[in-house]
Every structure is written in C-alpha cells, then in structure tokens.
C-alpha cells in the first residue's frame, strides 16, 4: 500500500464519525473489548497501524502498559497521532514511529503484546507480517488484534460487492480459516478468533442513522460539501449492508508465542 490512502481531509472525515484519534469503529469500548482478557499492566506493547493514536491513548491511559510503541506507514498520521498523545499527556509512555512496509524495525523478542486494530486489512503479505509478529514477541507474548475479514462466500453477496466497488481504500481481506492457517503456519500458538460481525452490523446501522440526522449531516456538509456527504453516506450504507449480509466480518484475532 502507498503512503497516501489517508490524506488529512479523509482523516477529519473518519474522525467526525468515530472520534478524534480513531480511524476505525467502536471507540475506547471496542479497544478494551479486544483486550478484555489480556493483562496489559506493566507490559511492553507494539501497535501495528496506529493511525492517529486513539487506541494508543486508550491503552496507555486506561490499561497502564510499561511502554507502548505505535507504528504506521503514513507520515501525516504518525505526526497527528504524536500530537494527540502529547495533548493527552501520555508521551512518556507512548511513542509513535514512522515505518516502511516490510520487516518490523525491532530486535527479536522486544514486546510482551503485539496489538493491532483494523489495520491488517491493508497488509497484502500477511504471512510475512505474522512471522514478524512472532519474531518481535517475547516467549509467552501475546498477539491480539481486530481485523476486517470476509466470509468464504463474500464474492457472491451483493451487499459485500457493492461496498467493495464504492470504497476508496485498498483492502486485502481473508476468511477466518485463511487467517487462522496463516497465523498458525507463522508459528503462533493457541490461535483463536472472536467474530464481531453482529456487533459491527448493529453499530454501522446506528452510524448510518446518525449520519442521516440533521445535526451530523449539517456539520459534515459544512466541512466537506453536499456532494461528499452523498458519496460518504452511500459508502457507509454499503458498508453496513456488507456486514448485515455477513460478507464483511470484523473479527478479533488471538495468538501466542510459545514460552
Ligand atoms: C483503518 S486505519 C486504523 C488506525 C488505528 N488502528 C485505529 O483503529 O484508529 C488503518 C491504519 O493502518 C495503517 N497501515 C496500513 N498498512 C500498514 C502497514 N503495512 N504497517 C503499518 N501500518 C499500516 C494505515 O496507514 C492506517 O493508519
């Protein structure tokens, strides 16, 4: 993926929907839901695809890691995320680093937890990424992520295909089985998934209603104009339908490096 998929106006557009610092749905509650069974306190955490830092602020502020490093490939996002973290007063715990696609720039066994929220969908070579996750995890360390997967029959579902044709982002989506196989082949153990499709379908439908409401609509049109509002609403309706028909499957992923 190139470094230009999240230009500033698109970031503002997404943050109007999901909150400052969040380029993915669910806010602080969903970040904590992903990590609900994981002890983060006192641990070192890597966040792959940190965006503008919302999830990093939640983890650093509420779950007390020893240290958190967020990485992303887009300079504007890293710069904005650093500002958000400084404003939250968390820059002694959390640090964001600009990286390139490819090997992770960390020593072997650097982190207790590798986290990621809705970013792996952009990664084409997931097999290599999972191998890198394993390499940088300490023995017994945990991989905990949320990703947007697709059902095995997604290509036959009109709702899913319509969303794929409308979205401006480039996605590389896998099924749950493909994901579990790649994580396992990479060497992760105790590989498990938690399907979040039902939650997301309800959330996305609620968000569409909010976007159609007068207040949100007026704010968006004031910022981006009516034509962009119509386009954005069409993408969001298609996205909600993609989840409703079961083609788009937001899913939590879990794995562990052997002790
Ligand atoms: C949907 S956003 C999610 C951002 C953040 N995790 C959140 O939940 O707000 C996806 C992010 O993944 C980043 N990304 C895409 N490919 C990446 C890669 N190979 N390595 C690191 N980050 C990547 C994008 O730049 C973007 O910030």
Image: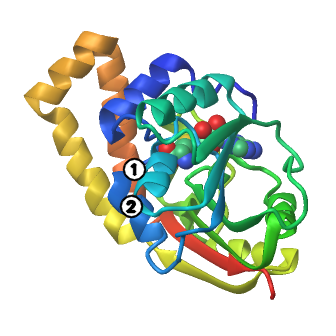
Neighbor class of circle 1 (other Cα within 10 Å; few <14, some 14-19, many 20+) is many
Whole-angstrom CA distance, mark 2 to mark 1, is 8 Å
Earlier residue among tags 2 and 1? 1
The image's mark for residue 30 is 2
Horizontal side of 200 relative to 171 (left or right) equals left
Q: Position of residue 88 (x, y in %)?
A: 41, 37
Q: Are marks 2 and 1 in contact (CB under 8 Å)?
A: yes
Residue at x-position 79% and y-position 59%:
126
Neighbor class of circle 2 (other Cα within 10 Å; few <14, some 14-19, many 20+) is some
Outermost residue to the left: 214
Residue 5 falls in image quadrant:
top right
Callout 1: helix, strand or loop?
Answer: loop
The quarter of the rendering in which ligand 1 is drawn is: top right
Q: Position of residue 205 (x, y in %)?
A: 25, 52
Callout 2: helix, strand or loop?
Answer: helix
- Mark 1 highlights which residue? 25
Q: Is mark 1 within 8 Å of ligand 1?
A: no
Whether residue 26 can be seen here: no
Of 86 and 152, the residue lying toward us: 86
Q: Position of residue 175 (x, y in %)?
A: 64, 69
Position of the C terminus by quadrant: bottom right
Whether residue 5 can be seen here: yes
Residue at x-position 64% and y-position 60%:
45
The image's mark for residue 61 is none
Outermost residue to the front: 92
Q: Nearer the viewer, mark 2 or mark 1?
A: 2
Residue at x-position 55% and y-position 38%:
91
Q: How is the image coloured?
A: rainbow
Horizontal side of 133 relative to 151 (left or right) equals right
């Amino acid at each position: 993926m190139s470094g230009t998929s999240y230009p500033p106006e698109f970031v503002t557009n997404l943050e109007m929907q999901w909150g400052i610092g969040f380029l993915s749905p669910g806010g602080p509650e969903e970040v904590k839901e992903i990590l609900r069974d994981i002890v983060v306190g006192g641990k070192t955490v890597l966040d792959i695809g940190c965006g503008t830092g919302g999830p990093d602020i939640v983890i650093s502020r509420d779950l007390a890691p020893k240290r958190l490093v967020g990485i992303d490939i887009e300079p504007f996002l890293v710069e904005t995320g650093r500002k958000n973290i400084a404003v939250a007063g968390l820059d002694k715990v959390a640090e964001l680093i600009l990286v390139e696609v490819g090997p992770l720039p960390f020593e072997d066994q650097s982190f207790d937890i590798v986290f990621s929220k809705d970013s792996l969908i952009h990664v084409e070579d997931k097999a290599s990424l999972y191998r890198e996750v394993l390499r940088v995890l300490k023995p017994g360390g945990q991989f905990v992520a949320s990703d947007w997967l697709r059902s095995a029959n997604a290509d036959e579902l009109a709702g899913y295909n319509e969303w794929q044709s409308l979205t401006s982002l480039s996605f590389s989506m896998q099924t749950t089985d493909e994901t579990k196989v790649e994580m396992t082949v990479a060497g992760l153990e105790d590989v498990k998934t938690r399907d979040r499709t039902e939650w997301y379908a309800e959330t996305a439908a609620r968000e569409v209603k909010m976007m159609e409401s007068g207040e949100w609509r007026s704010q968006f049109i004031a910022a981006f104009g009516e034509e962009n509002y119509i386009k954005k609403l069409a993408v969001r309706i298609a996205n909600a339908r993609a989840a409703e028909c079961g083609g788009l499957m937001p899913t939590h992923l879990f794995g562990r490096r052997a002790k």
